[in-house]
Amino acid sequence: MTEEQIRTTIFEALRKIAPEADAHSLSPDDDLRQALDIDSFDFLNFLVAIDEKLGVDIPEQDYGKLRTLKSIVDYLSAHTTGRG
C-alpha cells in the first residue's frame, strides 16, 4: 500500500468523525486532535475506522505515537508493508 493510499484512507476516516473539517489543509506535523478539535472518543473511532479499512490492529500502547498526519502515515506504512 502506498503512502498516498494510506493518506486517502486517513482523510476518509477523518471526514466521518469531523465532516466540517478540511483534513486536506493539515500539515504533516499538525496535531490531529487539536487541529480538528476532536475529542478522545472521536479519535478512538478514527483509529477503529483505520483498523477496519486497512486491517491494521493498533494496540492501545501505540495511540500516543499517532498524533500527527506524518506519524500516522509512517506507522501505517510500516504495518501495511506488502499489503494491497
Image (spheres, rainbow, N blue to C red):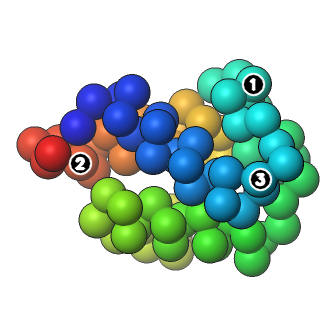
Q: Where the C terminus falls, by quadrant?
A: top left
Q: Nearer the viewer, mark 2 or mark 3?
A: 3
Residue 74, picture quadrant:
top left
> Which of the two labelled residues, at mark 2 and mark 3, occupies the earlier sequence position?
3
Can you see residue 29? no
Instruction: Answer few, some or many: residues within 10 Å of disc 3's Cα (few below 14, many 20 plus, some between 14 and 19).
Output: few
Q: Give, as a three-letter code, the residue at label 2.
A: Thr
Q: Nearer the viewer, residue 55 or 29?
A: 55
Residue 11, picture quadrant:
top right
Check if mark 2's residue and mark 3's residue have beta carbons within 8 Å. Answer: no
Q: Is residue 80 left or right of residue 11?
A: left
Look at the numbered disc 3 and give the secondary structure of its residue.
loop
Look at the numbered disc 2 and give the secondary structure of its residue.
loop
- Across and down, in percent, residue 57 comes to 35, 70
Q: Give, as a three-letter code, the residue at label 3.
A: Pro
Q: CA distance from mark 2 to mark 3?
A: 26 Å
Q: Is residue 39 left or right of residue 53?
A: right
Name the residue tied to disc 1. 25
Q: Which mark is residue 19?
A: 3
Q: CA distance from mark 3 to mark 1?
A: 13 Å
- Residue beneath the point at 37% across and 46% down: 76
Q: Is residue 61 above or below residue 84?
A: below
Q: Nearer the viewer, mark 1 or mark 2?
A: 1
Look at the numbered disc 1 and give the secondary structure of its residue.
helix
Q: Is residue 61 left or right of residue 39?
A: left
> Which of the two labelled residues, at mark 1 and mark 2, occupies the earlier sequence position?
1
Instruction: Answer few, some or many: residues within 10 Å of disc 1's Cα (few below 14, many 20 plus, some between 14 and 19).
Output: few
Check if mark 1's residue and mark 2's residue have beta carbons within 8 Å. Answer: no
Q: Seen from this angle, which residue lies furthest left?
A: 82
Q: Is residue 23 above or below residue 79?
A: above
Q: Nearer the viewer, residue 58 or 10?
A: 10
Q: CA distance from mark 1 to mark 2?
A: 25 Å
